[in-house]
Image: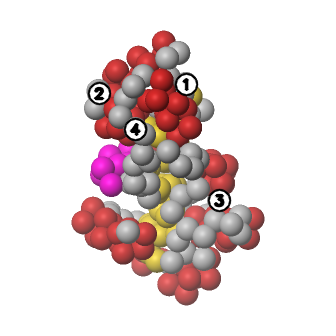
Amino acid sequence: MGKRPLRSYTTGDVARLCAVTKRTVIKWIDSGRLRGYRIPGSKHRRIAGAELAKFMREHGLPEYREIEPRRKVLIVDDDPDLGELLRDALRESYDVEVAVSALEAATRAPVFAPDLLLVDVRLPDVNGLELCRRLRSLLPALKAPILAMSAYGSEIDPAEIRRSGAAGFLPKPLRMADLKNRIRAMVG
């Protein structure tokens, strides 16, 4: 079977691999048949690749092969409605998590290991551009491009965006087609 993957899978990923519904996967986890875990502070469950491979072998499911890894996007915005809207718009193509503060983003980024961060410039605890600088200095292993966004684009100096470590800027309100094209151009 080869090297076991280190990534984790969503219940939707497991459902596709096993040709069952997400509800069935949740029942497997809740009953203890499939070892999974809940993301802290969330109702979402994840299953480690090694556990999934073991489960599939034990239950005679077709040989486990890692599905193509999906790119990950971490959205940092203090507006929970916008965060959910963006998550819903992007989740078909990407694994998406939302942080509502700079502190939450700084704690999630090393664990989630996003391929791209989408950061609001105006956050309640730290300016989004300052967050970009801190992420770059504190987490040198985090090589993900950062895309800044703001409804106050005319007040933001483009040179300041570049100095912060952000790779680009999008004005709010976001046009989903522009956002998706920009993400695709940056991470595939």
Looking at the rendered structure, the kind of residue marked 2 is Val
- With 152 as the anchor, is 174 left or right in this view? left
Give the residue at x 42% y 73%.
186
Q: Which residue is disc 3 drawn over?
A: 126
- SS class, disc 2: loop
Q: Which residue is mark 1?
A: 35
Whole-percent x and y of residue 57?
46, 29
Sooner in the amino-acid sequence: mark 1 or mark 3? 1
User: How far apart are the alpha carbons under marks 2 and 1?
Assistant: 17 Å
Q: Can you tell which of label 1 and label 3 is closer to the viewer?
A: 1
> Which residue corresponds to mark 2?
20
Q: Secondary structure at mark 3?
A: loop
Real-space Cα separation, disc 3 to disc 4, in angstroms: 47 Å
Q: Residues within 10 Å of mark 2 (few under 14, many from 20)?
A: few
Front-lying residue, 106 or 30: 30
Residue 51 quadrant: top right
Question: In x, y percent, where is residue 167?
Answer: 51, 77
Residue 178 percent across, percent down from the top left: 28, 70
Display coloring: secondary structure
In depth, the one of 50 and 44 nearer the eye is 50
The residue most toward the bottom is: 159
The magenta segment is 84-93
Cα–Cα gap, marks 1 and 3 = 38 Å
- Please tell me which of labels 4 and 2 falls first in the chain: 2
Q: Calculate the distance from the C-alpha at mark 4 to the C-alpha at mark 2.
A: 16 Å
Mark 4, residue position: 63
Q: Which marked residue is nearer to the observer: mark 2 or mark 3? A: 2
* Dots 4, 1 in contact, CB < 8 A: no
Q: Earlier in the sequence, mark 2 or mark 1?
A: 2
